[in-house]
Amino acid sequence: MSESEAPGTGRTPGGGSSGERAAGALDRGLAILTHVAGNRGVSTPEIAQALGLTRSTAYRLVDRLEEQGWLTHAPAAGQWQLGPTAVRLASAAVASTNLRDTAAPALRKLAELTQETVSLGVPNGLTMVFVHRERGTRPAVVTAELGASRPLHSSSLGRAYLAALPQQKLEDTLIELVRDPMSPVSAATVSEVHAEVERTRERGWSQDLRDFDESSCCCGAAVYDHTGMPVACISVAGVAERMAPLVPTYGPVVAQVCRELSSSLGYLPPGS
């Protein structure tokens, strides 16, 4: 079968040395994982178009990533999401710092208090990745698996992280958001993100009122380590109609939990 006639598997021989092919395939594979991580379900043709790949190359690489567990089928037909191998890698990154184990009791306590879904996310490029979750007793709309990601600009996890960054790091990150071809943030709209970050700083906690998902509302805050940098964020999410009026109540609670967790990681607030 020729390269142009490679539906499904797209397995084709390539030119050049084996080292060049391996390096090129690795770069393209990483680009695919980054793209899938930043999008909620994406098809192989969409991956090819977004990354400038031929369809045969995209199908070949996606098939390989699926075989190794980096990608798995999303609920929507023909779409992909990060797979169990990616989830294990994200979890290992957190486990290596014992952050998840340290945070787990606080997350369980918060879930018991609010009866809503409580999540722990860590930064990964221009997204936040779910690495731990405690479900409350109330019906939830948060169905994303561990390892799934949320954008910095429109999620409570991401906004909490942005607001916790030192000012120069924040400005640099916003520039990256504008420059990223996969980001909806543009030079014309970045001021809106900046304004929301400032509101988050003033409140002391972040909120997402149907911004990322029409069916849910959530609030969040950042966790700092001993260096004074944000290393994770915690969010409380629930069905929009129920959660929206509770966000102003739960926001300060999440912030207090994050302050206590930060203290256990050795963080000292400025002026302490």
Image (cartoon, rainbow, N blue to C red):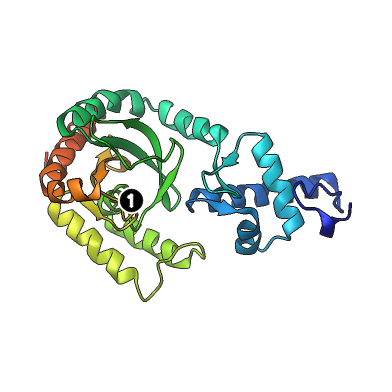
Q: Is residue 61 visible in the rendered structure shown here?
A: yes
Give amino acid for label 1: Gly
Image mark count: 1
Residue under the image location 39 percent in, 74 percent down: 187
Up the image or down, 12 lies above or below 83; here it is: below
Residue 122, percent from left and from top:
38, 40
Residue 175, percent from left and from top:
41, 65
Left or right: residue 210 versus residue 78 is left
Residue 97, percent from left and from top:
39, 28
Q: Secondary structure at mark 1?
A: helix
Left or right: residue 33 versus residue 6 is left
Residue under the image location 70 percent in, 43 percent down: 63
Residue under the image location 24 percent in, 62 percent down: 196
Mark 1 neighbour density, 10 Å: few (under 14) some (14–19) many (20 or more)? many
Dividing the picture into quarters, in which one does residue 200 lie? bottom left
Residue 20, percent from left and from top:
79, 50
In this view, the residue in front, 243 or 247, is 243
Left or right: residue 14 versus residue 231 is right
Q: Is residue 270 visible in the rendered structure shown here?
A: no
Residue under the image location 24 percent in, 50 percent down: 240
Report the residue that reaches farthest toward the bottom: 188
Report the residue that reaches farthest toward the right: 1
Dividing the picture into quarters, in which one does residue 48 lie? bottom right
Work out which quarter of the rendered image holds the C terminus and state it.
top left
In this view, the residue in front, 235 or 41, is 41
Left or right: residue 233 versus residue 77 is left
What residue did someone put label 1 on? 158
